[in-house]
Amino acid sequence: MRESSILQPGKLHTEKLAQRMKLPRELLLELAATSRRHGEFVDRAFAEVCQQTQASTWAEKSPRNVRRLAYIFRHFPKARFVHVIRDGRDAVCSLRAHHRGRRIDGEEVQIAPLRPLEQCARRWVDDVGAGLAWSHHPNYREIRYEDLVSDLEGSLRRLLESLGERFSPEMLDYHRKQSAVSTEPNFSRPIFGTSVGRWRRDLSAEELAQVGQLCGPLLEQLGYVDPETADGMLAAQPGSAG
């Protein structure tokens, strides 16, 4: 499923939600009108999705869910939260270019200005920190994006085992089928690793130094940089780009 943001507070945009959940808008309006609480509406809406897709478990992957964990665990005490952590330098590159480009004639063309680097760096620090605050919770699970890319099957097997779910080889062939859960372009191709280490291509020395100032402590805490040497990647000084 595309990111629905159904767990986020605020006005319920049923038209957009219906498109993303592949449910009739009239049904969502009825569920919203007859549900006593937002959590009940979410539960009933996903029950409809599970019935249509013959699934026994539902998942919602909107990144902002990391800020709603208190609400989620309070209203869905059996929910499991999977925290996917990525190298903040790569995450910053992705965040500032997200929806800023369009593929034209097979090439990615920038159609809007990149987001401010500081905004993206602070977003990564705040979001990852919000998730790590729940690392003590029994229903918290953590996985690294880089591990998924380098060993998809092994990573999935370990994650699903920790969740009490069964692994199926068909999970690795999602890109070969007409997706029943998402229309995103990336679902039509296998997982790729070209975005791992993209900061080496995308960030200038000045930009890397700025990211290091904001993200350095958390990058070190997570083991992405060596605190002794920083691999030379966070100590770059402005004006040192060749």
Image (cartoon, rainbow, N blue to C red):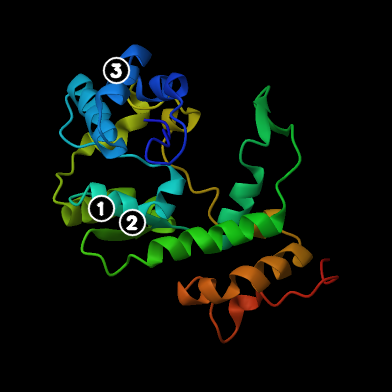
What percent of the width, then of the height, locates residue 125?
54, 64
The residue at 53%/80% (across/down) is: 226
Coordinates of residue 160 in the picture (x, y in percent): 21, 50
Q: 238 or 34: nearer the eye? A: 34
Chain-order first, disc 1 or disc 3: 3
- Amino acid beneath label 1: Arg
Front one among 11 and 172 = 11
The N terminus lies in which quarter of the figure? top left
> Which kind of residue does numbered mark 3 sit on?
Glu
Say what secondary structure mark 1 lies in. helix
Left or right of 185? Residue 181 is left
Mark number displayed over residue 74: 1
Q: Residue at x 45, y 19 (%)?
A: 15
- Name the kind of residue labelled 2 in the image: Ala
Front position in the image: 36 or 115: 36
Looking at the picture, how far across and down is residue 229, in whole percent? 60, 84
Name the element at disc 2. Answer: helix
Mark 2 and mark 1 in contact? Answer it, CB < 8 Å: yes
Question: Label 2 vs label 1: CA separation?
Answer: 6 Å
Q: Secondary structure at mark 3?
A: helix
**Where does label 2 land, which residue?**
70
Q: Residue at x 38, y 35 (%)?
A: 6
Q: Quadrant of residue 171?
A: top left
Q: Is residue 189 visible?
A: yes
